[in-house]
Amino acid sequence: MTTAVETRVPFRAPEPRTPAGTSAVLRDLALAAVAGANRAWSGHDRAGLVAEVAVGADGTPTYRIDAIVEEAIVEAARPHAVNLLSEELGFVDGGHAATVVIDPLDGSANAAAGVPLSCFSAALVVDGVAEEALSVWLETGHAVWVRSGEPVLYRTSGRTDLGSAAVDMLRPKVHAGGDSTAAWVRVSRAVSRVRVLSTSCLEAMLVAEGSIDGFLDPGSDTHRIVDLAAAMLFVPAAGGAVIDLHGRPLEFDTDLSRRWSGIVAATPQLAEALAEVALGEKALGETVVGGAD
């Protein structure tokens, strides 16, 4: 007798543990992301989850799991009368002052494979200014939240020394501007520990809470604003910094063709040190989204 092998992802996302002050719109979108992920996991096997069903607004393939999660989020956003800027759909203009910049499912390949490292991330931007951000580690329900101008209960590690830092990086890539392998190797030799988790939004959460000291794209210009928007609010609030490797301004923009090589670090000093090593030189632009000392 032959027994069928189950190829679906075996776990389900719990209800996110959002803080009491979280706005209704961000809480509802996070709940929708959880519901969408659970619907995708229960309804499709691993191969079905990574089937490419479209090309996203950022020009990269949309997996079926991405589409299912984003569809649930878009539906949940309708009653809240906000614009959306999302990785797959791009800008959905409702003519409102408020826009939610979302990465519906960061770490899609992880989520589809059953690696429990994926994240929902959102920033509420009003007239170009970020007012609130929420990121949720989907497989655990753990959340990081911030409202602009309010203190947070979490802190970065405070690390300033490069040699003792534990750092996550995007994998080395050949890209339009060259090859980030040499920069990746330089950073890996300069720090104490390196990990590749393949989920930028979750890694930013880990920096904000002091679990790791830094995270960076060492030059492949992979990050879009949806990858960095929430981190740009909650990491500085926790004492850290968010910069672009090449010193380009980090701006809220509806054009998802704009790319950055983001660095998220426990302190502005560590962010600058990581950039110097990745660049292989001392020069560094001055645009830093930095936190408290």
Image (cartoon, rainbow, N blue to C red):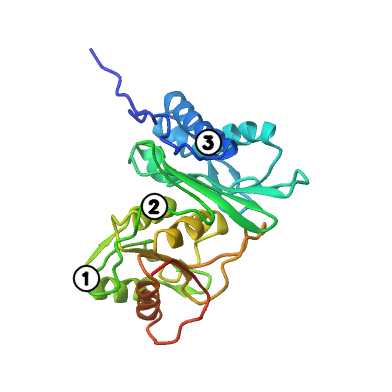
Residue 118, image x, y percentages: 40, 43
25 w.r.t. 166: above or below: above
How busy is the neighbourhood of tag 3: few (under 14 within 10 Å), some, or many (20 plus)?
some
Q: Residue at coordinates 35% horizontally, 65% vertically from top-left?
A: 266
In 3D space, how far apart are the residues under numbered discs 2 and 3 (Cα atoms)? 17 Å
Residue 253, image x, y percentages: 65, 60
Kindly identify which residue carries mark 2: 205
Which label belongs to residue 164? 1
Kindly identify which residue carries mark 3: 27
In the picture, measured across the screen, residue 155 lies left or right of residue 23, that is: left
How busy is the neighbourhood of tag 1: few (under 14 within 10 Å), some, or many (20 plus)?
few
Residue 212, quarter of picture: bottom left
Could you say which is closer to the camera, residue 76 or residue 158?
158
How busy is the neighbourhood of tag 2: few (under 14 within 10 Å), some, or many (20 plus)?
many
Residue 139, image x, y percentages: 36, 36
Residue 31, image x, y percentages: 50, 32
Amino acid under disc 2: Met
Amino acid under disc 3: Arg
In 3D space, how far apart are the residues under numbered discs 1 and 3 (Cα atoms)? 37 Å
Q: Is residue 151 visible?
A: yes
Please tell me whether mark 1 or mark 3 is closer to you in this view: 3
Q: Residue at coordinates 56% horizontally, 36% vertically from top-left?
A: 29
Q: Is residue 216 visible?
A: no
In 3D space, how far apart are the residues under numbered discs 1 and 2 (Cα atoms)? 20 Å
Could you say which is closer to the camera, residue 52 or residue 282?
282
Describe the element under mark 2 as helix, strand or loop.
helix
State the residue lying farthest toward the bottom: 282
Amino acid under disc 1: Ser
